[in-house]
Amino acid sequence: DIYFARQMVSQRLQSISSDLPPDVSAPQLGPISTALGEIYQYAVRGENKSLTELREIQDWIIAPQLKVVKGVTEINSFGGFVKQYEVVVSPEKIRTNGIGIKEITDAIANNNSVSGGNFLEHNREQYIIRGYGQINKPEDIRNIIIRSINNKPVYIKDIADVVVSTQIRQGGVTQDGKGEIVSGIVMMLRGGNGRQVIAEIEDKIEVINKSLPDGVRIEKFYDQSDLIDRTTSTISTNLLEGGFLVIVVLLLLLGEISGALIVAAVIPFSMLFAFIGMREFGLAANLMSLGAIDFGMVVDGSVVMIENIVHRLQKNKGENVDDVVISASKQVVRPIFFGVLIILMVYVPIMTFSGMEGILYRPMAITVAAAVLGSLLLALIFVPAISSIIFRKGVKVRRNYLIDWIKPRYYSGLDKNLDKRKFVSIAAAIIFGLSMIVMSRLGTEFLPELDEGSILVEQVRMPSVTLKESMDNANWLGGNLMENIPEINTVVPKTGRSDLANDWRGVHQTDVWVVLKPTDEWRDGISKEDIVAQIEPFLLTEPGLAYNFTQPIAMRVDELTSGVKSDLAVKIYGEDLDQ
Protein backbone atom coordinates (compact mmCIF):
# COMPACT_ATOMS: atom_id res chain seq x y z
CA ASP A 1 0.00 0.00 0.00
CA ILE A 2 1.83 3.10 -1.26
CA TYR A 3 -0.20 5.47 0.94
CA PHE A 4 0.53 3.51 4.12
CA ALA A 5 4.23 3.37 3.19
CA ARG A 6 4.31 7.15 2.60
CA GLN A 7 2.59 7.76 5.94
CA MET A 8 5.20 5.68 7.77
CA VAL A 9 8.09 7.44 6.02
CA SER A 10 6.51 10.85 6.66
CA GLN A 11 6.29 10.11 10.39
CA ARG A 12 9.95 9.11 10.48
CA LEU A 13 10.96 12.29 8.63
CA GLN A 14 9.07 14.44 11.12
CA SER A 15 10.79 12.70 14.02
CA ILE A 16 14.26 13.59 12.71
CA SER A 17 13.50 17.16 11.58
CA SER A 18 14.38 18.56 15.03
CA ASP A 19 17.83 16.93 14.86
CA LEU A 20 18.78 18.71 11.64
CA PRO A 21 20.84 21.92 11.62
CA PRO A 22 18.80 25.16 11.65
CA ASP A 23 19.73 26.02 8.07
CA VAL A 24 18.70 22.60 6.72
CA SER A 25 15.06 22.18 5.76
CA ALA A 26 13.29 18.92 6.56
CA PRO A 27 13.30 16.30 3.77
CA GLN A 28 10.06 16.02 1.81
CA LEU A 29 8.48 13.11 0.00
CA GLY A 30 8.32 13.21 -3.77
CA PRO A 31 5.04 13.02 -5.72
CA ILE A 32 2.83 9.92 -5.59
CA SER A 33 3.86 8.90 -9.06
CA THR A 34 6.11 6.46 -10.86
CA ALA A 35 9.08 7.01 -13.11
CA LEU A 36 6.69 6.38 -16.01
CA GLY A 37 4.31 9.11 -14.88
CA GLU A 38 5.57 11.86 -17.24
CA ILE A 39 2.48 11.57 -19.42
CA TYR A 40 2.31 15.11 -20.83
CA GLN A 41 4.89 17.78 -21.62
CA TYR A 42 4.39 21.25 -23.04
CA ALA A 43 6.15 24.51 -23.87
CA VAL A 44 5.06 27.98 -22.75
CA ARG A 45 5.53 30.47 -25.58
CA GLY A 46 4.85 34.19 -25.66
CA GLU A 47 5.48 37.05 -28.02
CA ASN A 48 7.63 39.82 -26.54
CA LYS A 49 7.96 37.91 -23.27
CA SER A 50 11.28 37.11 -21.63
CA LEU A 51 12.15 33.66 -20.32
CA THR A 52 11.81 35.02 -16.78
CA GLU A 53 8.28 36.29 -17.47
CA LEU A 54 7.27 33.01 -19.14
CA ARG A 55 8.63 31.03 -16.18
CA GLU A 56 6.65 33.26 -13.82
CA ILE A 57 3.47 32.58 -15.83
CA GLN A 58 4.22 28.84 -15.79
CA ASP A 59 4.85 28.70 -12.03
CA TRP A 60 2.06 31.00 -10.82
CA ILE A 61 -0.73 30.74 -13.40
CA ILE A 62 -0.47 27.50 -15.42
CA ALA A 63 0.90 24.97 -12.91
CA PRO A 64 -1.62 25.68 -10.10
CA GLN A 65 -4.54 25.23 -12.49
CA LEU A 66 -3.20 21.99 -13.96
CA LYS A 67 -2.60 20.55 -10.48
CA VAL A 68 -6.35 20.46 -9.82
CA VAL A 69 -6.94 18.08 -12.75
CA LYS A 70 -8.03 14.69 -11.43
CA GLY A 71 -5.19 12.18 -11.71
CA VAL A 72 -2.40 14.79 -11.70
CA THR A 73 -0.03 14.71 -8.73
CA GLU A 74 2.58 17.32 -9.68
CA ILE A 75 3.62 19.85 -12.33
CA ASN A 76 7.38 20.24 -12.78
CA SER A 77 8.77 23.34 -14.46
CA PHE A 78 11.94 23.12 -16.54
CA GLY A 79 13.76 25.90 -18.36
CA GLY A 80 13.73 29.67 -18.18
CA PHE A 81 14.77 31.73 -15.19
CA VAL A 82 13.16 31.86 -11.75
CA LYS A 83 12.66 35.47 -10.66
CA GLN A 84 14.08 36.56 -7.32
CA TYR A 85 14.81 39.77 -5.39
CA GLU A 86 18.48 40.10 -4.54
CA VAL A 87 19.68 42.23 -1.64
CA VAL A 88 23.20 43.48 -2.46
CA VAL A 89 24.68 44.51 0.87
CA SER A 90 27.37 47.18 1.16
CA PRO A 91 30.14 45.85 3.46
CA GLU A 92 31.17 49.36 4.50
CA LYS A 93 27.64 50.44 5.47
CA ILE A 94 26.85 47.36 7.56
CA ARG A 95 30.22 47.67 9.31
CA THR A 96 29.55 51.34 10.05
CA ASN A 97 26.12 50.58 11.50
CA GLY A 98 27.23 47.40 13.26
CA ILE A 99 24.62 45.27 11.50
CA GLY A 100 25.16 41.59 10.72
CA ILE A 101 23.92 39.57 7.78
CA LYS A 102 21.69 37.41 10.01
CA GLU A 103 20.03 40.52 11.35
CA ILE A 104 19.20 41.56 7.80
CA THR A 105 17.79 38.16 6.83
CA ASP A 106 15.72 38.01 10.03
CA ALA A 107 14.27 41.46 9.36
CA ILE A 108 13.27 40.49 5.83
CA ALA A 109 11.75 37.18 6.98
CA ASN A 110 9.78 38.83 9.80
CA ASN A 111 8.38 41.43 7.43
CA ASN A 112 7.30 38.95 4.75
CA SER A 113 4.34 37.26 6.41
CA VAL A 114 0.61 37.35 6.98
CA SER A 115 -0.68 37.14 10.55
CA GLY A 116 -3.98 37.27 12.37
CA GLY A 117 -4.92 40.03 14.81
CA ASN A 118 -7.99 38.93 16.73
CA PHE A 119 -11.57 39.89 15.77
CA LEU A 120 -13.57 43.09 15.50
CA GLU A 121 -17.28 43.09 16.38
CA HIS A 122 -19.49 45.65 14.68
CA ASN A 123 -23.29 45.72 14.26
CA ARG A 124 -23.64 42.17 15.58
CA GLU A 125 -21.12 40.91 13.00
CA GLN A 126 -17.59 39.66 13.47
CA TYR A 127 -14.68 40.71 11.27
CA ILE A 128 -11.23 39.15 11.15
CA ILE A 129 -8.32 41.50 11.66
CA ARG A 130 -5.38 40.45 9.53
CA GLY A 131 -1.96 41.92 9.08
CA TYR A 132 -0.87 41.59 5.45
CA GLY A 133 2.87 41.99 5.16
CA GLN A 134 3.92 39.99 2.10
CA ILE A 135 6.58 41.44 -0.14
CA ASN A 136 5.37 42.21 -3.67
CA LYS A 137 8.07 44.43 -5.14
CA PRO A 138 11.66 45.55 -4.48
CA GLU A 139 10.45 48.79 -2.89
CA ASP A 140 8.78 46.76 -0.12
CA ILE A 141 12.15 45.25 0.78
CA ARG A 142 13.94 48.61 0.65
CA ASN A 143 11.53 50.08 3.21
CA ILE A 144 11.98 47.30 5.80
CA ILE A 145 13.40 48.59 9.09
CA ILE A 146 16.33 46.59 10.42
CA ARG A 147 16.82 48.41 13.74
CA SER A 148 16.84 51.87 15.28
CA ILE A 149 20.13 53.64 16.06
CA ASN A 150 19.81 56.71 18.26
CA ASN A 151 16.04 56.66 17.69
CA LYS A 152 16.63 56.78 13.96
CA PRO A 153 15.39 53.78 11.90
CA VAL A 154 17.87 52.01 9.66
CA TYR A 155 16.22 50.73 6.47
CA ILE A 156 17.39 48.05 4.08
CA LYS A 157 17.87 50.77 1.47
CA ASP A 158 20.34 52.48 3.79
CA ILE A 159 22.80 49.61 3.79
CA ALA A 160 21.97 47.63 0.61
CA ASP A 161 20.63 47.83 -2.89
CA VAL A 162 17.65 45.64 -3.90
CA VAL A 163 17.59 44.43 -7.51
CA VAL A 164 15.53 41.98 -9.54
CA SER A 165 17.61 38.97 -10.60
CA THR A 166 17.25 35.25 -11.26
CA GLN A 167 18.13 32.13 -9.31
CA ILE A 168 21.23 30.14 -10.12
CA ARG A 169 20.20 27.28 -12.37
CA GLN A 170 21.73 24.02 -13.50
CA GLY A 171 19.53 23.17 -16.46
CA GLY A 172 17.66 24.43 -19.48
CA VAL A 173 15.50 23.37 -22.42
CA THR A 174 15.64 24.26 -26.12
CA GLN A 175 13.39 23.28 -29.01
CA ASP A 176 13.92 22.75 -32.74
CA GLY A 177 17.10 24.81 -32.80
CA LYS A 178 15.13 28.02 -32.14
CA GLY A 179 16.56 28.75 -28.73
CA GLU A 180 15.53 28.22 -25.15
CA ILE A 181 11.98 27.62 -23.98
CA VAL A 182 10.06 27.23 -20.73
CA SER A 183 8.49 23.79 -20.39
CA GLY A 184 6.17 21.97 -18.03
CA ILE A 185 6.01 18.27 -17.17
CA VAL A 186 2.73 16.77 -15.94
CA MET A 187 3.18 13.88 -13.50
CA MET A 188 0.29 11.41 -13.31
CA LEU A 189 -0.89 10.03 -9.98
CA ARG A 190 0.20 6.45 -9.38
CA GLY A 191 -2.44 4.05 -10.72
CA GLY A 192 -4.20 6.72 -12.81
CA ASN A 193 -5.84 6.15 -16.19
CA GLY A 194 -3.39 7.69 -18.65
CA ARG A 195 -5.83 8.21 -21.50
CA GLN A 196 -8.45 9.84 -19.28
CA VAL A 197 -5.94 12.08 -17.49
CA ILE A 198 -4.46 13.29 -20.79
CA ALA A 199 -7.93 14.09 -22.14
CA GLU A 200 -8.75 16.15 -19.04
CA ILE A 201 -5.38 17.93 -19.27
CA GLU A 202 -6.12 18.87 -22.89
CA ASP A 203 -9.51 20.28 -21.87
CA LYS A 204 -7.95 22.25 -19.01
CA ILE A 205 -5.19 23.67 -21.21
CA GLU A 206 -7.81 24.88 -23.69
CA VAL A 207 -9.43 26.82 -20.85
CA ILE A 208 -6.10 28.13 -19.51
CA ASN A 209 -4.99 29.38 -22.94
CA LYS A 210 -8.01 31.70 -23.03
CA SER A 211 -7.01 33.31 -19.73
CA LEU A 212 -3.30 33.82 -20.42
CA PRO A 213 -1.85 37.24 -21.31
CA ASP A 214 -2.03 38.26 -24.96
CA GLY A 215 0.43 36.34 -27.12
CA VAL A 216 1.16 33.67 -24.48
CA ARG A 217 0.08 30.11 -25.22
CA ILE A 218 0.69 26.51 -24.16
CA GLU A 219 1.96 24.16 -26.90
CA LYS A 220 2.15 20.40 -26.38
CA PHE A 221 5.24 18.65 -27.68
CA TYR A 222 4.90 15.19 -26.09
CA ASP A 223 2.25 12.99 -24.54
CA GLN A 224 1.64 9.27 -24.16
CA SER A 225 -1.85 9.23 -25.72
CA ASP A 226 -0.62 7.99 -29.12
CA LEU A 227 1.33 5.18 -27.46
CA ILE A 228 -1.68 4.24 -25.32
CA ASP A 229 -4.01 4.28 -28.34
CA ARG A 230 -1.61 2.21 -30.45
CA THR A 231 -1.09 -0.28 -27.64
CA THR A 232 -4.81 -0.76 -26.97
CA SER A 233 -5.43 -1.00 -30.71
CA THR A 234 -2.74 -3.69 -30.97
CA ILE A 235 -4.28 -5.62 -28.09
CA SER A 236 -7.78 -5.41 -29.59
CA THR A 237 -6.56 -6.40 -33.05
CA ASN A 238 -4.53 -9.34 -31.75
CA LEU A 239 -7.37 -10.61 -29.59
CA LEU A 240 -9.91 -10.36 -32.42
CA GLU A 241 -7.60 -11.94 -34.98
CA GLY A 242 -6.59 -14.69 -32.55
CA GLY A 243 -10.20 -15.45 -31.71
CA PHE A 244 -11.15 -15.50 -35.39
CA LEU A 245 -8.32 -17.88 -36.30
CA VAL A 246 -9.19 -20.23 -33.44
CA ILE A 247 -12.82 -20.33 -34.57
CA VAL A 248 -11.80 -21.02 -38.18
CA VAL A 249 -9.53 -23.87 -37.10
CA LEU A 250 -12.28 -25.32 -34.92
CA LEU A 251 -14.77 -25.22 -37.79
CA LEU A 252 -12.26 -26.88 -40.12
CA LEU A 253 -11.06 -29.65 -37.81
CA LEU A 254 -13.89 -30.59 -35.45
CA GLY A 255 -16.17 -31.63 -38.28
CA GLU A 256 -19.29 -30.66 -36.30
CA ILE A 257 -20.35 -27.05 -36.77
CA SER A 258 -22.49 -26.87 -33.62
CA GLY A 259 -19.66 -28.29 -31.52
CA ALA A 260 -17.22 -25.81 -33.03
CA LEU A 261 -19.53 -22.91 -32.17
CA ILE A 262 -19.94 -24.19 -28.59
CA VAL A 263 -16.16 -24.20 -28.17
CA ALA A 264 -15.92 -20.76 -29.80
CA ALA A 265 -18.44 -19.43 -27.26
CA VAL A 266 -15.98 -20.33 -24.50
CA ILE A 267 -13.61 -17.56 -25.69
CA PRO A 268 -15.72 -14.50 -24.76
CA PHE A 269 -16.87 -16.11 -21.52
CA SER A 270 -13.26 -16.87 -20.55
CA MET A 271 -12.35 -13.25 -21.29
CA LEU A 272 -15.16 -12.25 -18.94
CA PHE A 273 -13.49 -14.28 -16.19
CA ALA A 274 -10.19 -12.57 -17.04
CA PHE A 275 -11.75 -9.11 -16.72
CA ILE A 276 -13.38 -10.07 -13.41
CA GLY A 277 -10.00 -11.19 -12.09
CA MET A 278 -8.36 -7.96 -13.29
CA ARG A 279 -11.02 -5.90 -11.56
CA GLU A 280 -10.66 -7.81 -8.29
CA PHE A 281 -6.88 -7.30 -8.28
CA GLY A 282 -7.08 -3.69 -9.50
CA LEU A 283 -5.34 -4.34 -12.83
CA ALA A 284 -5.75 -2.13 -15.89
CA ALA A 285 -6.18 -3.44 -19.41
CA ASN A 286 -2.81 -3.00 -21.10
CA LEU A 287 -0.25 -4.80 -23.20
CA MET A 288 1.31 -6.58 -20.22
CA SER A 289 -1.95 -7.81 -18.68
CA LEU A 290 -3.73 -8.91 -21.87
CA GLY A 291 -0.88 -9.55 -24.28
CA ALA A 292 -0.13 -13.09 -23.04
CA ILE A 293 -3.66 -14.51 -23.37
CA ASP A 294 -3.60 -17.47 -25.77
CA PHE A 295 -7.01 -18.50 -27.09
CA GLY A 296 -5.70 -21.91 -28.07
CA MET A 297 -4.85 -22.49 -24.42
CA VAL A 298 -8.25 -21.15 -23.36
CA VAL A 299 -10.27 -23.56 -25.55
CA ASP A 300 -8.03 -26.57 -24.95
CA GLY A 301 -10.21 -28.20 -22.29
CA SER A 302 -13.44 -27.42 -24.16
CA VAL A 303 -12.09 -29.04 -27.34
CA VAL A 304 -11.34 -32.27 -25.45
CA MET A 305 -14.77 -32.20 -23.84
CA ILE A 306 -16.76 -31.53 -27.02
CA GLU A 307 -14.74 -34.06 -29.03
CA ASN A 308 -15.53 -36.81 -26.55
CA ILE A 309 -19.19 -35.83 -26.30
CA VAL A 310 -19.63 -35.81 -30.09
CA HIS A 311 -17.77 -39.11 -30.39
CA ARG A 312 -19.91 -40.81 -27.72
CA LEU A 313 -23.18 -39.43 -29.11
CA GLN A 314 -22.26 -40.67 -32.57
CA LYS A 315 -21.30 -44.09 -31.19
CA ASN A 316 -24.33 -44.48 -28.90
CA LYS A 317 -27.14 -43.32 -31.15
CA GLY A 318 -30.60 -43.88 -29.73
CA GLU A 319 -29.53 -43.67 -26.08
CA ASN A 320 -30.62 -40.89 -23.73
CA VAL A 321 -28.64 -37.76 -24.66
CA ASP A 322 -28.24 -36.57 -21.07
CA ASP A 323 -26.88 -39.93 -19.95
CA VAL A 324 -24.39 -40.03 -22.83
CA VAL A 325 -23.23 -36.45 -22.18
CA ILE A 326 -22.76 -37.15 -18.45
CA SER A 327 -20.85 -40.35 -19.15
CA ALA A 328 -18.66 -38.66 -21.78
CA SER A 329 -17.94 -35.76 -19.43
CA LYS A 330 -16.90 -38.05 -16.59
CA GLN A 331 -14.39 -39.78 -18.88
CA VAL A 332 -12.40 -36.61 -19.56
CA VAL A 333 -12.82 -34.60 -16.33
CA ARG A 334 -9.54 -35.89 -14.92
CA PRO A 335 -7.28 -35.19 -17.96
CA ILE A 336 -8.91 -31.77 -18.52
CA PHE A 337 -8.46 -30.79 -14.87
CA PHE A 338 -4.82 -31.86 -14.69
CA GLY A 339 -4.06 -30.33 -18.09
CA VAL A 340 -5.33 -26.93 -16.95
CA LEU A 341 -3.62 -27.34 -13.57
CA ILE A 342 -0.27 -27.85 -15.30
CA ILE A 343 -0.77 -24.64 -17.27
CA LEU A 344 -1.60 -22.74 -14.06
CA MET A 345 1.49 -24.08 -12.31
CA VAL A 346 3.63 -22.42 -14.98
CA TYR A 347 2.33 -18.99 -13.90
CA VAL A 348 2.52 -19.50 -10.12
CA PRO A 349 6.25 -18.56 -9.90
CA ILE A 350 5.53 -15.37 -11.85
CA MET A 351 2.88 -14.40 -9.29
CA THR A 352 5.57 -14.50 -6.59
CA PHE A 353 7.79 -11.93 -8.35
CA SER A 354 8.56 -8.80 -6.33
CA GLY A 355 9.97 -5.40 -7.18
CA MET A 356 9.97 -4.19 -10.76
CA GLU A 357 9.61 -7.74 -12.11
CA GLY A 358 6.43 -8.19 -10.09
CA ILE A 359 4.98 -4.86 -11.19
CA LEU A 360 5.50 -5.71 -14.85
CA TYR A 361 4.81 -9.44 -15.04
CA ARG A 362 2.43 -10.26 -12.19
CA PRO A 363 -0.58 -8.69 -14.01
CA MET A 364 0.06 -11.00 -16.96
CA ALA A 365 0.11 -14.10 -14.73
CA ILE A 366 -3.04 -13.08 -12.85
CA THR A 367 -4.96 -12.32 -16.05
CA VAL A 368 -3.97 -15.56 -17.77
CA ALA A 369 -4.72 -17.57 -14.62
CA ALA A 370 -8.18 -16.01 -14.34
CA ALA A 371 -8.92 -16.74 -18.01
CA VAL A 372 -7.68 -20.34 -17.77
CA LEU A 373 -9.62 -21.00 -14.55
CA GLY A 374 -12.71 -19.61 -16.23
CA SER A 375 -12.13 -21.85 -19.24
CA LEU A 376 -11.83 -24.86 -16.90
CA LEU A 377 -15.20 -24.12 -15.29
CA LEU A 378 -16.75 -23.58 -18.71
CA ALA A 379 -15.29 -26.83 -20.06
CA LEU A 380 -16.57 -28.85 -17.10
CA ILE A 381 -19.97 -27.16 -16.64
CA PHE A 382 -21.02 -25.00 -19.58
CA VAL A 383 -19.94 -27.23 -22.48
CA PRO A 384 -21.72 -30.41 -21.23
CA ALA A 385 -24.87 -28.45 -20.33
CA ILE A 386 -25.17 -26.65 -23.64
CA SER A 387 -24.24 -29.84 -25.53
CA SER A 388 -27.18 -31.72 -23.99
CA ILE A 389 -29.45 -29.01 -25.42
CA ILE A 390 -27.84 -28.49 -28.83
CA PHE A 391 -27.41 -32.22 -29.55
CA ARG A 392 -30.88 -33.21 -28.36
CA LYS A 393 -31.70 -34.41 -31.88
CA GLY A 394 -28.35 -36.08 -32.41
CA VAL A 395 -25.09 -35.03 -34.06
CA LYS A 396 -24.27 -34.56 -37.71
CA VAL A 397 -20.57 -35.04 -38.28
CA ARG A 398 -19.39 -34.07 -41.73
CA ARG A 399 -16.57 -35.86 -43.42
CA ASN A 400 -13.32 -33.98 -42.79
CA TYR A 401 -11.05 -34.42 -45.82
CA LEU A 402 -8.09 -32.80 -44.08
CA ILE A 403 -8.24 -35.28 -41.19
CA ASP A 404 -8.79 -38.14 -43.66
CA TRP A 405 -5.57 -37.10 -45.42
CA ILE A 406 -3.59 -36.75 -42.18
CA LYS A 407 -4.68 -39.99 -40.45
CA PRO A 408 -3.03 -42.65 -42.67
CA ARG A 409 0.22 -40.69 -42.81
CA TYR A 410 0.26 -40.24 -39.06
CA TYR A 411 -0.49 -43.92 -38.39
CA SER A 412 2.23 -44.98 -40.82
CA GLY A 413 4.77 -42.67 -39.21
CA LEU A 414 3.71 -43.77 -35.74
CA ASP A 415 4.29 -47.45 -36.58
CA LYS A 416 7.75 -46.71 -37.95
CA ASN A 417 8.71 -44.65 -34.89
CA LEU A 418 7.53 -47.36 -32.51
CA ASP A 419 9.66 -49.89 -34.37
CA LYS A 420 12.70 -47.62 -33.87
CA ARG A 421 11.83 -46.29 -30.44
CA LYS A 422 15.44 -46.24 -29.18
CA PHE A 423 16.65 -44.27 -32.17
CA VAL A 424 13.76 -41.80 -31.84
CA SER A 425 14.40 -41.35 -28.10
CA ILE A 426 18.13 -40.74 -28.63
CA ALA A 427 17.42 -38.32 -31.48
CA ALA A 428 14.93 -36.42 -29.31
CA ALA A 429 17.48 -36.20 -26.49
CA ILE A 430 20.15 -34.89 -28.90
CA ILE A 431 17.77 -32.30 -30.32
CA PHE A 432 16.84 -31.22 -26.79
CA GLY A 433 20.51 -30.86 -25.85
CA LEU A 434 21.24 -28.82 -28.98
CA SER A 435 18.25 -26.60 -28.27
CA MET A 436 19.56 -25.88 -24.76
CA ILE A 437 22.94 -24.89 -26.23
CA VAL A 438 21.28 -22.61 -28.77
CA MET A 439 19.04 -21.10 -26.09
CA SER A 440 22.05 -20.23 -23.90
CA ARG A 441 23.50 -18.22 -26.80
CA LEU A 442 20.35 -16.29 -27.66
CA GLY A 443 20.89 -13.56 -25.08
CA THR A 444 18.27 -12.14 -22.74
CA GLU A 445 16.55 -8.84 -22.09
CA PHE A 446 14.27 -7.62 -19.32
CA LEU A 447 11.50 -6.44 -21.66
CA PRO A 448 10.96 -6.71 -25.41
CA GLU A 449 11.42 -3.41 -27.20
CA LEU A 450 8.22 -1.41 -27.60
CA ASP A 451 8.06 1.20 -30.34
CA GLU A 452 7.04 4.34 -28.43
CA GLY A 453 6.92 6.60 -31.48
CA SER A 454 9.77 8.72 -30.10
CA ILE A 455 13.55 8.53 -29.84
CA LEU A 456 15.62 9.70 -26.90
CA VAL A 457 19.32 10.44 -27.33
CA GLU A 458 21.31 10.45 -24.09
CA GLN A 459 24.35 12.72 -24.41
CA VAL A 460 27.27 12.95 -21.98
CA ARG A 461 30.02 15.58 -22.38
CA MET A 462 33.11 16.37 -20.36
CA PRO A 463 32.09 17.15 -16.73
CA SER A 464 33.83 20.54 -16.90
CA VAL A 465 31.61 21.87 -19.70
CA THR A 466 29.42 24.90 -18.98
CA LEU A 467 25.63 24.94 -19.16
CA LYS A 468 25.71 27.44 -22.01
CA GLU A 469 28.07 25.31 -24.08
CA SER A 470 25.94 22.19 -23.58
CA MET A 471 22.75 24.03 -24.47
CA ASP A 472 24.31 25.66 -27.53
CA ASN A 473 25.44 22.29 -28.87
CA ALA A 474 22.06 20.71 -28.14
CA ASN A 475 20.28 23.62 -29.81
CA TRP A 476 22.47 23.24 -32.91
CA LEU A 477 21.65 19.54 -33.04
CA GLY A 478 17.92 20.20 -32.78
CA GLY A 479 17.98 22.69 -35.63
CA ASN A 480 19.91 20.38 -37.95
CA LEU A 481 17.69 17.39 -37.22
CA MET A 482 14.55 19.40 -37.97
CA GLU A 483 16.06 20.72 -41.18
CA ASN A 484 17.35 17.42 -42.56
CA ILE A 485 14.96 14.69 -41.35
CA PRO A 486 11.33 15.32 -42.39
CA GLU A 487 9.98 12.44 -40.28
CA ILE A 488 10.75 14.37 -37.08
CA ASN A 489 7.93 16.39 -35.56
CA THR A 490 9.95 18.23 -32.92
CA VAL A 491 13.30 18.01 -31.10
CA VAL A 492 13.48 19.06 -27.44
CA PRO A 493 16.92 18.75 -25.80
CA LYS A 494 16.86 18.94 -21.97
CA THR A 495 20.21 19.80 -20.43
CA GLY A 496 21.01 19.43 -16.74
CA ARG A 497 18.22 19.26 -14.18
CA SER A 498 15.14 21.23 -13.24
CA ASP A 499 14.60 22.97 -9.90
CA LEU A 500 12.25 20.20 -8.72
CA ALA A 501 14.57 17.53 -10.00
CA ASN A 502 13.24 14.09 -10.82
CA ASP A 503 16.63 13.42 -12.37
CA TRP A 504 20.03 14.15 -10.93
CA ARG A 505 21.81 15.28 -14.07
CA GLY A 506 24.77 17.56 -14.40
CA VAL A 507 25.07 20.33 -16.98
CA HIS A 508 27.25 17.98 -19.05
CA GLN A 509 24.29 15.64 -19.62
CA THR A 510 21.53 16.20 -22.16
CA ASP A 511 18.48 14.13 -23.01
CA VAL A 512 17.39 14.90 -26.57
CA TRP A 513 13.69 14.10 -27.07
CA VAL A 514 13.08 13.37 -30.75
CA VAL A 515 9.31 13.15 -31.26
CA LEU A 516 8.41 11.53 -34.59
CA LYS A 517 5.47 12.17 -36.87
CA PRO A 518 2.85 9.42 -37.47
CA THR A 519 4.29 6.67 -39.68
CA ASP A 520 1.81 7.39 -42.48
CA GLU A 521 3.57 10.76 -42.96
CA TRP A 522 7.03 9.18 -43.41
CA ARG A 523 8.79 8.77 -46.72
CA ASP A 524 8.36 5.43 -48.44
CA GLY A 525 10.76 2.76 -47.25
CA ILE A 526 11.91 4.69 -44.16
CA SER A 527 12.04 2.84 -40.84
CA LYS A 528 12.85 3.99 -37.33
CA GLU A 529 16.29 2.39 -37.64
CA ASP A 530 16.89 4.52 -40.74
CA ILE A 531 16.03 7.67 -38.78
CA VAL A 532 18.47 6.69 -36.03
CA ALA A 533 21.14 6.15 -38.69
CA GLN A 534 20.45 9.64 -40.08
CA ILE A 535 20.73 11.23 -36.61
CA GLU A 536 24.08 9.63 -35.74
CA PRO A 537 26.31 11.63 -38.17
CA PHE A 538 25.24 14.89 -36.49
CA LEU A 539 26.27 13.49 -33.11
CA LEU A 540 29.70 12.50 -34.40
CA THR A 541 30.53 16.12 -35.25
CA GLU A 542 30.89 17.07 -31.56
CA PRO A 543 34.31 16.01 -30.17
CA GLY A 544 34.31 13.99 -26.96
CA LEU A 545 30.56 13.39 -26.96
CA ALA A 546 29.30 10.03 -25.68
CA TYR A 547 25.76 9.15 -26.69
CA ASN A 548 23.20 6.39 -26.54
CA PHE A 549 19.92 5.82 -28.38
CA THR A 550 16.89 4.74 -26.38
CA GLN A 551 13.25 5.76 -25.87
CA PRO A 552 11.62 7.90 -23.16
CA ILE A 553 9.79 5.11 -21.32
CA ALA A 554 12.56 2.58 -22.01
CA MET A 555 15.04 4.92 -20.32
CA ARG A 556 12.84 5.11 -17.22
CA VAL A 557 12.43 1.33 -17.14
CA ASP A 558 16.22 0.91 -17.35
CA GLU A 559 16.63 3.31 -14.43
CA LEU A 560 14.03 1.43 -12.41
CA THR A 561 15.66 -1.90 -13.20
CA SER A 562 19.12 -0.76 -12.16
CA GLY A 563 17.87 1.49 -9.35
CA VAL A 564 20.41 4.13 -10.37
CA LYS A 565 19.95 7.48 -12.14
CA SER A 566 23.35 9.05 -11.50
CA ASP A 567 26.73 8.28 -13.05
CA LEU A 568 28.04 6.65 -9.89
CA ALA A 569 26.26 4.69 -7.17
CA VAL A 570 27.48 2.74 -4.16
CA LYS A 571 25.31 -0.16 -3.02
CA ILE A 572 25.93 -1.49 0.50
CA TYR A 573 24.85 -5.04 1.32
CA GLY A 574 24.68 -6.76 4.67
CA GLU A 575 22.43 -8.31 7.27
CA ASP A 576 23.25 -5.88 10.10
CA LEU A 577 22.58 -2.22 9.32
CA ASP A 578 24.46 -1.10 12.45
CA GLN A 579 27.79 -2.50 11.28
Image: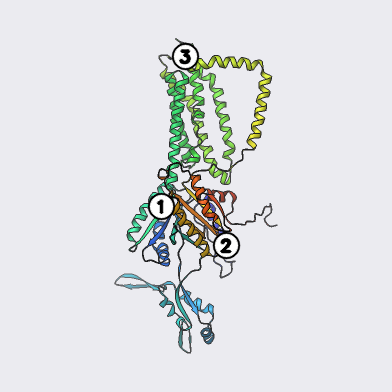
Q: Give the residue at the far right of this rendering.
A: 579
Name which residue lies at 34% across and 55% down: 206
The outermost residue toward the top is 318
Which dot, 1 or 2, sits closer to the camera?
1
The single residue placed furthest to the bottom in the displayed view is 150
Image x and y of residue 154, in percent: 46, 84
Q: Is residue 537 above or below residue 134?
A: above
- Label 3 crowd bin: few (<14), some (14–19), many (20+), radius 10 Å: many
Q: Name the residue under label 2.
A: 15
**Mark closer to the observer (2, 3):** 3
Q: Is mark 2 on a helix, strand or loop?
A: helix
Question: Does 14 sit left or right of 389 as displayed?
Answer: right
Disc 1 crowd, CA 10 A, few/some/many (<14, 14-19, 20+): some
Q: Between marks 1 and 3, how big is the CA–CA gap?
A: 59 Å
Residue where numbered disc 1 is placed:
70
Residue 313 is marked as 3
- Residue at the image point whose x is 65% and y is 54% from the top: 571
Residue found at the far left of this picture: 123
The amino acid type, in three-letter code, at marker 2 is Ser
